[in-house]
Every structure is written in structure tokens, then in C-alpha cells.
Image (cartoon, helix red, strand yellow):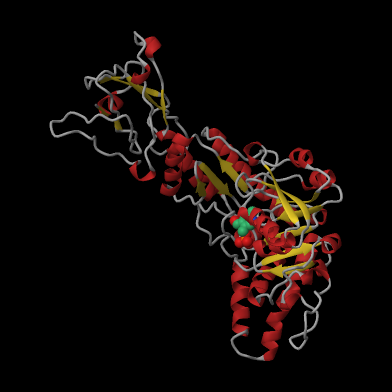
């Protein structure tokens, strides 16, 4: 078995349908084993055990250096990405460009630093869709800009920034990169950035507390280690006065790091180095493309740039479809992150066919529930007034399943301007109309697909509903749909 195959195998404990690696990466078996072993060693009080586990900090830095092909003294462990970014941004002067829709870690650290020290100005750029391209950054560069700070892979859109292009565009200015959504799954020359900050609890499967930062020699000349604490100072506990910060990246450290976190990080990095980031990155991209293909097949718009992404795919369904899509994911055991009307699907090396099949089933289910309102007035006689054309709304997630008609005691329906609830078989459609409405037409896009267990027909089924309670499906409706309409 190749190293790559055994790494794919190591995802075996992850539940099928887990497609949320951008939020949290379930710990790898190697990470868990190392953590348990090192925890045992810390349980005895034997100095040899304590020293051995303490050495994990240096080991993790050395492994990070090998992975980034950079000297280990440029690397310092951090509790989190945000800690590392804070070291970089609080020590910065001049003007820093940050994407307006960036994850808050960069924006907030920059804003707080600007307020606290008064030597930094934050300028936001907000390109269309929040997708930052080299030309957007280049267009915002002015002489006062001293640094650009952004994510290599955007947490929301999944867009992968062109690091080499960015480096070239910004010249001598500092390039500060939040690498958390990229590290381990993007094969890039990290030396192009002056500051690289990340954490291992997502794509490295190493758990929280496994943060790290790289500060280039140039970054160290320009970024004052204002947050340097006891682990970033020269001397020891007996040193009096205000000691100087240490040489190298070690200056950007507040307090000694957690050796158990370092041991988790080291275990993850060892495995990754054995396989090679290039191979992992290629496979992760392929898995993300599987997601994009499925989204295309089921007509769900994709926000993520198809030519520049890693493991994150952002779906941007029509807002009317978003709740149905989120519910379908939940019903099929697909774990993703839904924010507003966008849904983030994130795949890793081990997101195999079982997960992709579940995703397909969920997308098929949601497609089967999709509803559009169509004005058939041109075919049905006189034009209805605007008030007779109904907006079909997808109900909230918990109302998605079929519900009985809101009929009053005497059996007549209550008037309502909202319209539909479907069950999984599209067996029941509830449409309410005003007294004067002549027709209300809902088309259930009931696409036949290989994933839908209950797809009944490949044809769209227009429903035509009269205000007297009669309904017919005179275009291509079938009995089941006709009978299901209650009004
Ligand atoms: C782009 C980005 N930066 C930073 C963070 C937060 O990282 P940490 O908890 O390591 O500070 C996240 C978390 O999702 C993120 O997506």
C-alpha cells in the first residue's frame, strides 16, 4: 500500500457524509495515538518523559520548516491562527490592505492594532462576490500601503489566491497570509509570503492548539514584537527589567507552548511529509471537483472559482431553495456549514464515494422539492392582474415536511399569501389563493436522477389551481398531483 493509500485509509473513522473540514478536521489515528502516548509520559513525573514530550515543540517547528522548505528559526508555535496574526498586525506600521469579507481573524486583529497603537491604518478592499484577485489588490496599492493581509483560501468562497501573482504585484511590501484553510492541502511556495499563520485543527487533523507562524527576516525587521512575552524574551525567570525580545521568530511568542499540542501537530506533519503535499493537494482538488460536478448536475450555483480552489466549495442556491437544501443535507446525514443562503461543502482526501453519494442524494432530494412560480396567463386566457400571480415560498426547515391544509372548521381554506409544503414524494401541495385569483401555477421540477429514490417522473408538473377549489393539471399533470392540491 502506498503512503497516499494508507493516508486515505486513515480517514476510515470519519462518518460518511462529513463534508465540513473547513470547520473542523476530525483527528487522524496517528494524531490520537501520539497524543495518548505522550499524555501517558507526562503522567509519571519522570524527567526523561517530561523532556521527551517537551522536545515535541522543537520537532514540530523543524517539521513545519521541512514542509515549508524554510529554516526552523523562522517558525514559532502559536495557540491559534488568530494569536499569530495578532503578533503580526499589532507590530505593523503604515497601511494594511485587508479584504472586507475576510474571516474576522485578520480584520479584527488589524482593527484592534490600529486603535491600540495609532501607527496603523486599515484599508478594506471589497471586490465582487468578495473574491480577491491579484488585480483587485494591485488596484488598491498606494505608496502608503506597507502590507497586504489575507487568507490564501477564503473561508467563505473557497477561492484560492494567486500567491505568486500577489507577491509580484505588491513588490517589497509585506505579505501576511492566513493559511488555515490551505495548509497541508495546497502545494505552494510558502516562502513567497513574509508571514504565514495557521492552525492544525482543520486540514491537518491535529486538533486545536496546534497553531504556528512563520516570520521572514524581512518581516522581523518591520514587525515590532510588541506582544512578546516570557517565551519571547532573552534570559530566564531571574532576568530583571524588561528583557529584549529573542532573535528570530521566537520573539513573537507570549507564553510557552503546549507540548501535547506540539506532539499532535508533529504526528500530523510526519504523515503529511511521508505522502507529500502535492499529492494530497491534487486529490483534495479532485474531491472538490466532484462536489462542483454534482452541484452543476442539480442546478445549484457554485460561488467558488472553478480554476482556483482547494477543498472548499461554496454553493449559492437561490435563497428560496436554501432552506430545502440545508434540510436535505441534514436529512441525508451530510455535514456542511450553512451561513445565510450559502452552503459551504468542504472535502478532504478521505471524502470518498460514500460521502459523495450522500451529497448527491441530498442534492437530488432538494432538487425534487424545488418549486418555481410560472405565469401561464398567456396560455390561459385573459392576463391575471399582478395580485393574482403568487410568490411561492419555501418554508423554514422545520416546516418542510408535508403538513395538513390550514382549513377552517367549515372546511374552507384560510386565506394566505404563502403557498407550499411538500413531502418527499411531492404528494401534497398546498396552495392558498385569494377569492379573485383565477389561476395559481406551481411547477415542481421533478428531475429524474440516479440518486433520487423516490423520483416519480422526469417531467415538470405544472399545477393549475382555481379559486373555487378545483384544480387541474391540464398541461401534463397526473392524477396524483391534481388530487393533492387543496384550496
Ligand atoms: C480563515 C480563517 N482564519 C482564522 C480562523 C480561526 O482560526 P484560529 O481558531 O486558529 O484562530 C478561521 C476559522 O475558521 C478561518 O477560517
- Is 162 rendered above or below residue 251? above
In this rendering, position of residue 138 left or right of residue 319: right
Give 286 or 198, whichever is nearer the viewer: 198
Q: Position of residue 329 (x, y in %)?
A: 46, 46
Q: Residue at x 34, y 8 (%)?
A: 381
User: Residue 357's x, y, as percent?
Assistant: 51, 45
Q: In this rendering, would 268 be left or right of 477? A: right
**Which quarter of the rendered picture does the C terminus lie within?**
top left
Horizontal side, residue 122 vs residue 418: left or right: right
In the picture as drawn, the residue positioned furthest to the bottom comes out as 46
Residue nearest the viewer, comparing 129 with 157? 129
Residue beneath the point at 74% across and 72% down = 228
Vertical placement of residue 344 versus 378, above or below: below
Based on the displayed image, in which of its 4 quarters is residue 306 positioned?
top right
Q: Quadrant of ligand 1?
A: bottom right
Q: Position of residue 474 (x, y in %)?
A: 32, 16
Quadrant holding the N terminus: bottom right
Image quadrant in which you'd find residue 82: bottom right
Residue furthest to the front: 118
Foreground residue among 139 and 363? 139
Residue 479 image offset from top left, x and y in percent = 28, 24
Amino acid at each position: 500500500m502506498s503512503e497516499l493509500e494508507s493516508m486515505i485509509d486513515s480517514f476510515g473513522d470519519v462518518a460518511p457524509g462529513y463534508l465540513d473540514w473547513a470547520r473542523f478536521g476530525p483527528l487522524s489515528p496517528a494524531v490520537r495515538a501520539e497524543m495518548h502516548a505522550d499524555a501517558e509520559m507526562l503522567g509519571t513525573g519522570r524527567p526523561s518523559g517530561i523532556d521527551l514530550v517537551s522536545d515535541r515543540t522543537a520537532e514540530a517547528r523543524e517539521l513545519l520548516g521541512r514542509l515549508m522548505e524554510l529554516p526552523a528559526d523562522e517558525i514559532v508555535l502559536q495557540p491559534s491562527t488568530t494569536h499569530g496574526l495578532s503578533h503580526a498586525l499589532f507590530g505593523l506600521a503604515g497601511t494594511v490592505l485587508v479584504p472586507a469579507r475576510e474571516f474576522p481573524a485578520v480584520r479584527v486583529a488589524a482593527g484592534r492594532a490600529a486603535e491600540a497603537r495609532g501607527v496603523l491604518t486599515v484599508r478594506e478592499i471589497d471586490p465582487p462576490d468578495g473574491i480577491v484577485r491579484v488585480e483587485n489588490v494591485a488596484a488598491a496599492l498606494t505608496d502608503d500601503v506597507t502590507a497586504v493581509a489575507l487568507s490564501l483560501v477564503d473561508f467563505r468562497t473557497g477561492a484560492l489566491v494567486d500567491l505568486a501573482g500577489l507577491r509580484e504585484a505588491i513588490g517589497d511590501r509585506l505579505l501576511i497570509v492566513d493559511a488555515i484553510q490551505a495548509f497541508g492541502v495546497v502545494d505552494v511556495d510558502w516562502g513567497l509570503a513574509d508571514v504565514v499563520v495557521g492552525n492544525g485543527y482543520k486540514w491537518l487533523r491535529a486538533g486545536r492548539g496546534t497553531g504556528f507562524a512563520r516570520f521572514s527576516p524581512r518581516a522581523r525587521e518591520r514587525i515590532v514584537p510588541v506582544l512578546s512575552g516570557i517565551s519571547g524574551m532573552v534570559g530566564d525567570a531571574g532576568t530583571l527589567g524588561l528583557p529584549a525580545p529573542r532573535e528570530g521568530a521566537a520573539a513573537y511568542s507570549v507564553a510557552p507552548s503546549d507540548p501535547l499540542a506540539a506532539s499532535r501537530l508533529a504526528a500530523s506533519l510526519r504523515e503529511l511529509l511521508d505522502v507529500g503535499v502535492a499529492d494530497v493537494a491534487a486529490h483534495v482538488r479532485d474531491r472538490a471537483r466532484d462536489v462542483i460536478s454534482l452541484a452543476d448536475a442539480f442546478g445549484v450555483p457554485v460561488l467558488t472559482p472553478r480554476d482556483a480552489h482547494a477543498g472548499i466549495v461554496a454553493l449559492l442556491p437561490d435563497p428560496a431553495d436554501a432552506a430545502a437544501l440545508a434540510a436535505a443535507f441534514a436529512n441525508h446525514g451530510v455535514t456542511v456549514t450553512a451561513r445565510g443562503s450559502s452552503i459551504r461543502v468542504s472535502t478532504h482526501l478521505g471524502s470518498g464515494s460514500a460521502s459523495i453519494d450522500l451529497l448527491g442524494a441530498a442534492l437530488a432530494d432538494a432538487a425534487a422539492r424545488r418549486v418555481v412560480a410560472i405565469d401561464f396567463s398567456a396560455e390561459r386566457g385573459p392576463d391575471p392582474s399582478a395580485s393574482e400571480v403568487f410568490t411561492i415560498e419555501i418554508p423554514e426547515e422545520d416546516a418542510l415536511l408535508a403538513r395538513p391544509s390550514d382549513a377552517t372548521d367549515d372546511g374552507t381554506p384560510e386565506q394566505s399569501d404563502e403557498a407550499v409544503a411538500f413531502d418527499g414524494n411531492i404528494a401534497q401541495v398546498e396552495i392558498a389563493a385569494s377569492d379573485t385569483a383565477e389561476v395559481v401555477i406551481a411547477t415542481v421540477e421533478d428531475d429524474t436522477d440516479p440518486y433520487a429514490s423516490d423520483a416519480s417522473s422526469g417531467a415538470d408538473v405544472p399545477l393549475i389551481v382555481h379559486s373555487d377549489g378545483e384544480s387541474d393539471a391540464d398541461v401534463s399533470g397526473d392524477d396524483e398531483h391534481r388530487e393533492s392540491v387543496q384550496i
